[in-house]
Image: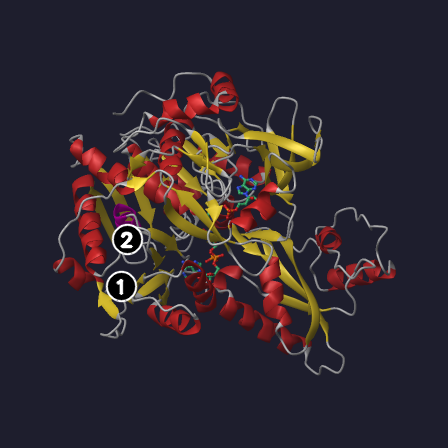
Amino acid sequence: MNSTTDLVMNYKQEYIASTTSPEQFWLDKAHNIEWFSAPETAIASAENGYQSWFKGGQLNNSYLALDHHVNAGRGEKAALIYDSPVTNTTRTYTYNELLNEVATFAGALQGLGVSKGDRVIIYMPMIPQAAIAMLACARLGAIHSVVFGGFAANELAVRIDDATPSFIITASCGIEGAKQIPYKPLVDKAIENASHKPNGCVVFQRPQLHAELDSSFDHDWHSLMENSSPVSAVKVDATDPLYILYTSGTTGKPKGVVRDNGGHAVALHYSMGALYGIDKNDIFWAASDVGWVVGHSYIVYGPLIKGATSVMYEGKPVGTPDAGAFWRMIERHSINILFAAPTAFRAIRKEDPEGEFIKQYDLSSLRTIFMAGERLDPPTYYWTLEKTNKPVVDHWWQTETGWPICSNPMGIEPMATKPGSSSVPTPGFNVKVLKGPDTEAEPGEKGSIAIQLPLPPGCLSTIWQDHSRLVNGYLREFEGYYSTGDNGYIDDEGYVFIMGRTDDVINVAGHRLSTGEMEEVLAAHPAIAECSVIGINDALKGQLPVGLVLLKDGANIEESELEKELVAQVRQSIGPVACFKRAIVVKRLPKTRSGKILRKLLRQIAADEPISVPSTIDDPSSVDEIAALMRDKGLVEAVNV
Ligand code: COA
Ligand code: AMP
């Protein structure tokens, strides 16, 4: 059914068509994927009162990613290239091979009783079995929820209780540089801590570390595969959930972003061509992790639905073994598009400022470098551009949207770059800067960035088990709009500049974390009366969390000992990914008269920005006091980005 090209109009025409006639625009795009039963409408109202896409359509994302290409005679083409410098392994799966693995693992899951609508949690390192598990769930219509390996058992337990999975799929270990991280004990502990108990756990045993299995609960991946047969993809409704992906909000409880099946497939297929300029013959590498939205959309589903080749990398930009890793990968696999977080390039630049490694490799296959996950700071932009001599594109998106809200549409009409900007709104996203419920900002004027409803296909359809969280968290602030939680401005040529979050979410090494969640962990310490966690600038990771803590009267603990205990507590409760390494004791925290901690003011002090002291402050002298203390502790512009 496929294959009219997406790239028929220029950007302006395409954008206007998408925002003025979204129904027609997206029905046209929907014709580019194969449906079991094609939808007759694009946008409809959902039962929960929100929007839904392609109601009445039936399809299967695993079928689209695999069977569709095999049926079209492309079974011998490379689907997935796995490259793991930490285990010295490279393996290419053709579409035929990947389909066989996925269909057989789906058969195994079915044999265990997993069926349409069941949830399955996947807690895995960056190995092909993670993608196989995701696609196998999709094949059965089971809803997967992948949890990033850098989260601790407690975080996994919270997700188990929210998603109530029938099974968990894991591996015996992850490999982080030179360290082996045993995953199975973490999973066991999470299940022990959770109130919900899954029916069992499937474990992929890696040769590097053997996990002890409990024969009454655990199932060995390899034995299951030997004893199972491939099964076909089931028909699911376009509006059925494909996956839940948890992301940090302002409270301690993560939000389960739900993605539907139909909008997801249409949007990702469109984005591969329109934004990344990818076709079937291309090799696409998103250097992220399957635990993040980038991994879902652009390691697993997007490139495969497009019929291209996706690269899966189990390593770091530096240290596995050196700062030439990215360039070596590009030469070795003839990669056409690279997508990674700016923090990865800052890590490379730190070790190889002159780009000596770049000179050692042939980068002729590489067309464009895309960056996202955090703002692409101009020094990193210029360094990457100058050293690689390739176009560098900053594009902005979030777990909730599933694909870029703003980008340089390389497949429609490549546009001039403005460093510091993530370029222009993507077709489908009607982006506005708002100063108040009915007031749009002027060009160049800062405000809250919101997207006029309806959101395009592929964005969140609800928050798992809590639709009111979508309504209250995203749709209430500005009626008729989705609030992104980011602020910034649009210039007079329509370029969007994202300046940072309006809430208490921080971004550490391209990972989104909640300061509220860290505060809950610190507040549980018996010596702490009150606390605030803020993000301070960091030259490598963009931001790092720092805890400012107020002791209870009579608490008797050395500051260095307290810091050690708090660091351990955050690592144990949230995980190493939080990168929480600093906590300082303060005498007072600046507050409003109603007792609210002035976090924005603390952030301004740390960033050495002009301070705006609100008139509602309780005790203005606390500002100078805390500024002096933070300077003293080396927390003010600790390292400038
Ligand atoms: N499983 C277990 N532990 C993990 C993990 C995983 N999947 N990922 C990270 N961790 C651990 C790390 O080992 C580290 O532990 P440590 O404190 O014991 O050293 C900790 O979590 C922090 O990890 P990270 O922030 O990734 O730091 P790093 O020093 O290992 O690597 C970068 C730094 C910049 C190279 C790395 O953060 C990076 O590549 N970031 C890109 C992120 C990204 O792709 N984001 C998605 C948007 S595109
Ligand atoms: P996540 O949901 O983890 O992908 O994080 C989304 C958040 O990361 C956004 O709301 C932004 O705050 C930030 N972000 C992602 N990409 C960019 C970008 N290109 N420029 C600026 N901020 C970004």
Residue 321, how many percent across, how many down?
Answer: 37, 55
Cβ atoms under marks 2 and 1 closer than 8 Å: yes
Q: Is residue 77 visible?
A: no
Q: Which residue is mark 2?
A: 133
Residue 288 location, x and y as percent? 41, 48
Q: Amino acid at mark 2?
A: Ala
Which residue is painted at 48% across and 21% down in the image?
Answer: 21
Question: In the figure, is residue 399 to the left or right of 222?
Answer: right
Q: Quadrant of residue 211?
A: bottom left
The correct choice, above or below, for 519 with respect to 99 in the image is below
User: Which range of residues does the magenta coloring cover?
Assistant: 128-140
Of pointers 2 and 1, the one earlier in the residue sequence: 2
Q: Using residue 561 as the reference point, say whether residue 586 is left or right of it.
A: right
Q: Which mark is residue 202?
A: 1
> Which quadrant of the figure has residue 3?
top left
Q: CA distance from mark 2 to mark 1?
A: 10 Å
